[in-house]
Amino acid sequence: MSDHQPSLFSAAELKGCYKVTPAAGSELSPAALTDWKQRIWQYQQQVQSQMPMQQGSLFEPETSLDPDWIDPFVLPRQNTEFWRWKAADIGVSALYFVIDYELPILLYVGETVKSNQRWKGEHDCKRYLLNYRQVHYQHGIASTLGIGFWAEAPTQTRPRQQLERTLIRKWRAPFNKENWQFWATPFVGSA
């Protein structure tokens, strides 16, 4: 008996049926990718240099809701695949920040009511990260993707979403659609 699997169609009949679509951003040259990241890094460095000193106060609990007091780069790092792990609880209301720690640049700002469940299922940012990772891999450029959660976010949806919007505008995170016009984000197409 032969291991050969016969084909129902000839090569001519199949021509054009299979189309491999490159990942979004894959047309970026290494120099263009590096330049894109450098521009974001320079902007975010200016934002970070304008942040107030992290001095806590016993009498002013409201300062924690001030976006100027939230530094995404000092939050504990987690793997971006955290949502695949088994968690004992559903998590807490939080803001989260997707960061490439290699440069470092803040790529995405989000909010959730259940931090351990937010990325289960569909989430556009997972596709953007896949595209981003792939382009880095193709060009042999290092990236160290991670996510940090800020668990002091308001539990009420509206105040948490307002804080998220303020941080998106402040940091101009390129994967947030509100900032695509600033960075011409090349990673948001289909994977």
Image (cartoon, rainbow, N blue to C red):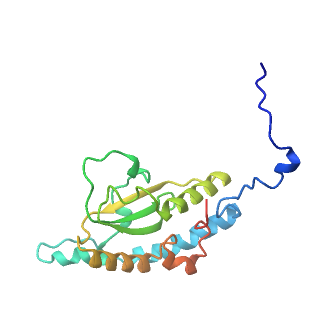
For the point 32% across and 55% down, the residue is 116
Location of the N terminus by quadrant is top right
Location of the C terminus by quadrant is bottom right
Q: Is residue 15 left or right of residue 140?
A: right
Please identify the quarter of the rendering in which residue 184 is found.
Answer: bottom right
Where 78 sits versus 69, above or below? above
For the point 42% across and 76% down, the residue is 168
Residue extending farthest front = 8
Q: Is residue 21 left or right of residue 169?
A: right
Where 58 sits versus 131, above or below? below
Q: Is residue 52 visible?
A: no
Please state the horizontal and vertical placement of residue 190, each as a whole percent of the image: 61, 63
For the point 52% across and 73% down, the residue is 42
Q: 178 or 7: which is nearer to us? A: 7
For the point 51% across and 69% down, the residue is 175
Q: 68 or 122: which is nearer to us? A: 122
